[in-house]
Image: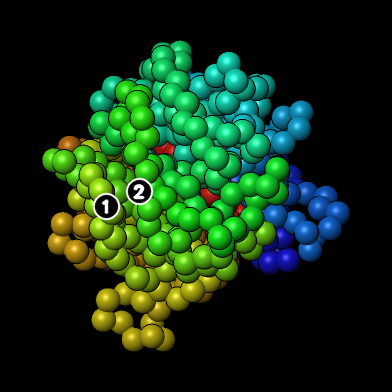
Amino acid sequence: MRYLDEHFAPVTEEITAFDLPVTGRIPDELNGRYLRNGPNALGVEDPAAHIWGMGQGMVHGVRLRDGGAEWYRNRFVRMPAFAPMVHVLAHAGRVFALAEGGLPPAELDDELNTVGIGELGGSPEGFTAGAHSKHDPVTGELHSLSYMPGRDFVQHIVTEAGGDVTRITVVPIARTPFLHDFALTRDHVVLWDTPLGFDGFDCRWHPEHPTRVGVMPRTGGDMRWLDIDPVHISHTLNAYDDGESIVVDVVTAEGPFDPADPGAIRPVLDRWTITADRIHQQRVDDRPQDFPRVNEVYTARPYRYGYTSASALYGIPFAAEGAPPDGAFTNALVKHDLVRGTAEVHGFGVDEAVGEAVFVASGAGEDEGYLLTYVHNPQRDAADLVILAAQDFTGDPVARVHLPARVPLGLHGNWMPDR
């Protein structure tokens, strides 16, 4: 069971450390907290049956201020039953750890302690904000696509900037799909119904089930379904309206997908152009990558730059353009210029496990800012918070904040700027 060993191995202690050592210089404009959630399963009775994405959540955080690294904390998400372990975000002045499948969010305090069940995106039917809820940078709304195993519908839930739910749209669906992510544009919501879905609470790949993509107005209305060839859809990079078409950039993989072995697929980056009656699919980058992020000022709007990770989760070599095969990276971050059709690669060492990187804007330019991510430092057997300048992507990190402990490979996180 590789998902309990090496870079995935859980940590057993909650740690608080202050005045963290730094190599390089932390930019003065980075004032806030970088938080990332992920599974941290302890006491697994049957490792052979363990599912990585089902472990108890643990949030790891670093506080930056005025060019210094004030603290590192890791805290279990402490809930009565299943603890959210997929994502962490801020909305309406509060911080929430998120899961999916109808599991409620957990509210966290400023020091990452669990306050209790978080009231975010709740509906009368018991649905809540989903794992990949998305902020609209213009309206301040939080859009969630929420599912619950066994229900014959999903819900698009809109929560306004102050925290109140303002609209719920019910989308009828014959069986419960695994809706880990979705796409949002200025005017539309795009979701997918793939062979990966639920029989009761058992999530598995149903090869006989078709793949279809649904499009509906963001303000509610009928869902328009379009069929495509069977495919697994991992994450959304971004999406936007383009005249009468909708452009959706997504990470896809050939099936089957096994929830018990998520690293067995080969994810790639695709672009879908959705018209009234068809979907044109274009391969953006055939090299293995996942965990896509953008400058979130451009969420749901036309954009140029996207960032992905060649992660140890998949363990497939990722070669920079023109590099020999023996020069490929197992751990790397990738910056895509979607206008020019080019990509830059920032590689890390063989044992420097890297996950998702979050973009933090520092100016008006789309790529004017920094990428923050946790990277395993094999020399210390602990993690570094690595800060890269997006406009000098292949250059040396601006700074490495040396953490006192390992950070297991995890899932998703966000930058929480000081209010």
Q: Nearer the viewer, residue 122 or 115?
A: 122
Residue at x-position 62% and y-position 22%: 126
> Is 2 drawn above or below residue 12 in the view shown?
below
In this figure, which residue is indicated by the disc labeled 2? 226
> Is 78 drawn above or below residue 231 in the view shown?
above
Residue 185 location (% of width, % of height): 28, 36
Image quadrant containing the C terminus:
top left
Is 311 situated left or right of 2 in this image? Answer: left
- Which image quadrant is residue 78 in? top right
| Helix, strand or loop status at disc 1 | loop
Amino acid type of the residue that numbered disc 2 sits on in the rendered structure: Leu
Between marks 2 and 1, how big is the CA–CA gap? 6 Å
Q: Residues within 10 Å of mark 2 (few under 14, many from 20)?
A: some
Residue at x-position 60% and y-position 20%: 125
Residue at x-position 25% and y-position 32%: 186
| Helix, strand or loop status at disc 2 | strand
Disc 2 to disc 1: CB gap under 8 Å: yes
Residue 353 location (% of width, % of height): 53, 63
Q: Residues within 10 Å of mark 1 (few under 14, many from 20)?
A: some
In this figure, which residue is indicated by the disc labeled 1? 278
Q: Which mark is residue 117?
A: none
Amino acid type of the residue that numbered disc 1 sits on in the rendered structure: Arg
Residue at x-position 52% and y-position 65%: 255
Visible residue check, residue 133:
yes
